[in-house]
Amino acid sequence: MKTITLDGQALEAVAGHYDEALRLIEERFDVRISARGNEITLQGEGDEAGDREIRVQDLLEQLSDLQSRGIPLGREEIRTAIGLMERSGPVRLADHFIQGAIRTSTRKAIVPKSRNQRTYLEGMLNHDLVLAIGPAGTGKTFLAMAMAVSLLNQKRVDRIILARPAVEAGERLGFLPGDIAAKVDPYLRPLYDALYVMLEQDHADRLLERGTIEIAPLAFMRGRTLHRSFVILDEAQNSTSAQMKMFLTRIGMETKAVVTGDITQIDLPSETVSGLVEAGKILKDVPEICISEFDENDVVRHPLVRSIIQAYDRYEEES
């Protein structure tokens, strides 16, 4: 059993409404928590009870430290901190909430929610080309978009270019009416959705109108050379070998390129080689290129998504 004392404001922030956060910590770490005044008592049972108590003590004290540094501790921040401590073992929360945070607008900062996400952000800062490979919901596109907007705000790049292969994901969409923009819009809509999370919609729309931010099908990249740009190729597992080589050779001076994809969700014909799979093999030993890999432990969507990914992995292994 351990007893620790927290600052009153920190305890209020950590406990949340109706002690929601403390109950969540109890569930995740299998430690009973009792709060009385500014004192919190931790009691674990069974094997490794002492280790679990120490981890919870570390978590609560680091949350208190973040509160004292002016970091607002809302429900999302608490859940992020719990996930980091639960999945990553010993970790300095300040590295994620302060040093690793990205500010894309006047809104709150975007914080990496796992060790792999933080490594990914560092890779984008320190390399001109990054390949991000992993399952859905691990933040590959979201964090790349956040980094792009942050560097645009710092005037380290002049524009953002977002591209996707226009590949039907199992459904036959048939003939789409309208001009070329209307025809490819369904394929590119997820990029707009991510952009509007980063920026106020009016601001984002102005940048799109001026061409500071451009969203286009991968095929439109052919023949271009992109200088002082942040270029994201999303859903790259659906690019062909030729398309991937074409995209990678568009990189101009002072340009950063990020290629994201999930190699378990390839919608290309079975006889077609995925450009992302091939690029991962060809470029793995090039020191100037960063390859970031994610797994189900990095999933930051609904907790059920992680369970679904694990269930599919087990099924495929058994099959």
Image: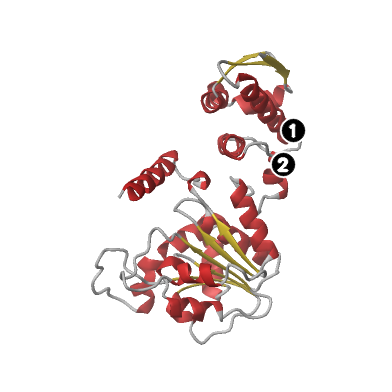
Q: Residue furthest bottom?
A: 223
Local crowd size for mark 2, using a 10 Å CA cut-off: few (<14), some (14–19), many (≥20): some
Name the mark on residue 99. none
Q: Which amino acid type is marked by label 2?
A: Ala
- For the point 34% across and 79% down, which residue is it? 179
Q: CA distance from mark 1 to mark 2?
A: 9 Å
Pinpoint residue 27: horizontal percent, then vertical percent. 51, 25
Of the pair 207 and 41, the residue shown nearer to us: 41
Q: Is residue 258 above or below residue 250?
A: above
Q: Is residue 46 visible?
A: yes
Q: Secondary structure at mark 1?
A: helix
> Is residue 284 left or right of 93 when viewed as pictured?
left
Q: SS of the residue at dot 2?
A: helix
Q: Which residue is mark 2?
A: 94
Quarter where residue 230 is shown: bottom right
User: Eyeballing the image, is 108 above or below 240?
Assistant: above
Q: Is residue 168 left or right of residue 64?
A: left
Which residue is found at the position 51% from the left and 66% from the top? 205
Q: In the picture, which quadrant includes the N terminus? A: top right
Residue 21 at what x, y percent from top left? 56, 27
Q: Is residue 186 left or right of residue 20?
A: left
The picture places residue 232, in percent across and down from the top left corner, at 54, 68
Above or below, 2 relative to 277: above
Viewer-closest of 54 and 172: 54
Residue at image point 38% right, 67% down: 187
Res. 65 mark: 1
Which residue shows up at 41% across the image and 63% down it? 189
**Which of the two labelled residues, at mark 1 and mark 2, occupies the earlier sequence position?**
1
Q: Residue 224's spot in the image, x, y percent?
A: 54, 85
Query: Crowding near pointer 1: few (<14 within 10 Å), some, many (20+)?
Result: some
Amino acid marked by disc 1: Asp
Disc 1 to disc 2: CB gap under 8 Å: yes
